[in-house]
Image: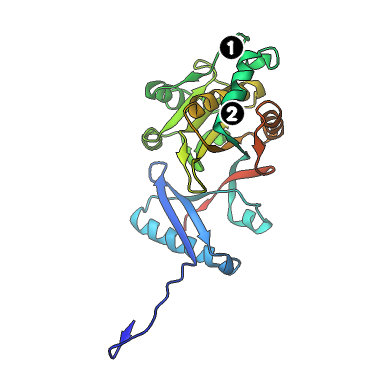
């Protein structure tokens, strides 16, 4: 700031930020990256920012009807006055060294008698990886996935999408590994991001897996298949975050500890997709 040739120091305070994208054929405003500085929390800043962004989006996209958020914090009673819950998933977060995991996965493959349900010789056929055509066929041209997905919603890496062609135009541009146990009658499906580096140290990677279905053995099978595929060439540390049916969290946490010998980063938390009317 200058005045009469004098220079005064200026400061910039960032108290909150938010990003928004429009999905579901223009009917949904998806709120992402809503963050408030710690010293400003509890002062109504988030509400002001949400209203401002909602008004801005509505001015440019008048067909927007609802605002959706994906949260991992504990919902409070007043939140239920503002939001409708669309679905909940448990969050299982583990970490490991890629080199150690490869050895452990080799042991599981060599000793089928320890985990017979995971054996390739068991009655369950191996998971099927989907190409773009089979994704369209399963998710858009049939009703096979509607009962499997929570509230008929694809939640990919915190982003909830309805089963609409415009949303799959977005999803299929991403690096995602799509998998089901059976293309003719799927009971477990999963979406896995390809590993991406994160700035928490040298050679740290993140892997996100969205898992749908309630069959524990098939969930284990797809989980291991994703790990085998996406950690085979990695060297370093991996944070793996899996979103799954809440009832499967405990048995999968036990499996990760006993069978894979990986570290549980935190106890049970939930991913909640909520929405409110866009006003």
| Relative image position of residue 101 (x, y in whole percent) | 59, 28
Which of discs 1 and 2 lies nearer the camera? The answer is 2
**Residue density around tag 1, few if under 14, some if 14–19, many if 20 or more, within 10 Å:** some
Give the quarter of the figure containing the N terminus.
Answer: bottom left
For this rendering, which residue is in front, 95 or 139? 95
Q: Is residue 87 above or below residue 114?
A: below
Q: CA distance from mark 1 to mark 2?
A: 19 Å
What colouring method underlies this structural image? Answer: rainbow
Say what secondary structure mark 2 lies in.
Answer: helix
Q: Is residue 272 above or below residue 131?
A: below
Left or right: where 166 falls relative to 238:
left
| Relative image position of residue 65 (x, y in whole percent) | 45, 50
Left or right: where 121 falls relative to 206:
right
Q: Which residue occupies the extreme bottom position in the image?
A: 4
Q: Residue at x 52, y 36 (%)?
A: 236
| Residue 149 shows in this picture | no
Tell me the number on the disc at residue 101: 2
User: Which quadrant holds residue 151?
Assistant: top right
Q: Which residue occupies the extreme left position in the image?
A: 5
Say what secondary structure mark 1 lies in.
Answer: loop
| Relative image position of residue 24 (x, y in whole percent) | 42, 41
Left or right: where 260 falls relative to 232:
right
| Relative image position of residue 262 (x, y in whole percent) | 65, 33
Left or right: where 58 falls relative to 149:
left
User: Which quadrant holds residue 141?
Assistant: top left
User: Which quadrant holds residue 164?
Assistant: top left
Q: Residue at x 66, y 24 (%)?
A: 216
Q: Residue at x 31, y 84 (%)?
A: 2
For this rendering, which residue is in front, 63 or 172? 172
Q: Which residue is mark 1?
A: 120
Q: Is residue 36 above or below residue 100?
A: below
């Amino acid at each position: 700031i200058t005045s009469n040739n004098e220079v005064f120091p200026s400061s910039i305070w960032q108290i909150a930020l938010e990003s928004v994208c429009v999905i579901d054929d223009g009917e949904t405003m998806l709120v992402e990256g809503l963050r408030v500085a710690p010293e400003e929390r509890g002062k109504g800043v988030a509400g002001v920012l949400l209203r401002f962004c909602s008004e801005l989006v509505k001015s440019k996209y008048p067909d927007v009807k609802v605002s959706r958020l994906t949260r991992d914090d504990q919902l409070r009673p007043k939140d239920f006055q503002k939001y409708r819950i669309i679905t909940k998933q448990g969050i299982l977060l583990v970490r490991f060294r890629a080199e150690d995991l490869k050895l452990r996965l080799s042991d599981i493959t060599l000793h089928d008698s320890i985990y017979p349900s995971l054996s390739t010789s068991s009655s369950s056929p191996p998971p099927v990886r989907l190409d773009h055509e089979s994704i369209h066929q399963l998710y858009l041209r049939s009703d096979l996935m509607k009962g499997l997905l929570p509230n008929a919603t694809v939640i990919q890496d915190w982003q909830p999408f309805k089963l609409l062609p415009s949303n799959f135009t977005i999803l299929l541009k991403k690096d995602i590994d799509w998998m089901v146990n059976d293309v003719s009658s799927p009971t477990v499906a999963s979406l896995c991001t390809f590993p991406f580096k994160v700035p928490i140290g040298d050679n740290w990677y993140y892997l996100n897996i969205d898992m749908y279905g309630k069959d524990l053995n098939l969930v284990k099978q797809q989980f291991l298949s994703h790990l085998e595929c996406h950690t085979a060439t990695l060297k370093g540390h991996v944070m793996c975050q899996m979103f799954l049916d809440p009832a499967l969290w405990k048995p999968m946490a036990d499996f990760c500890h006993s069978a894979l010998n990986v570290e549980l980063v935190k106890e049970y938390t939930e991913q909640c997709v909520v929405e409110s009317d866009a006003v």
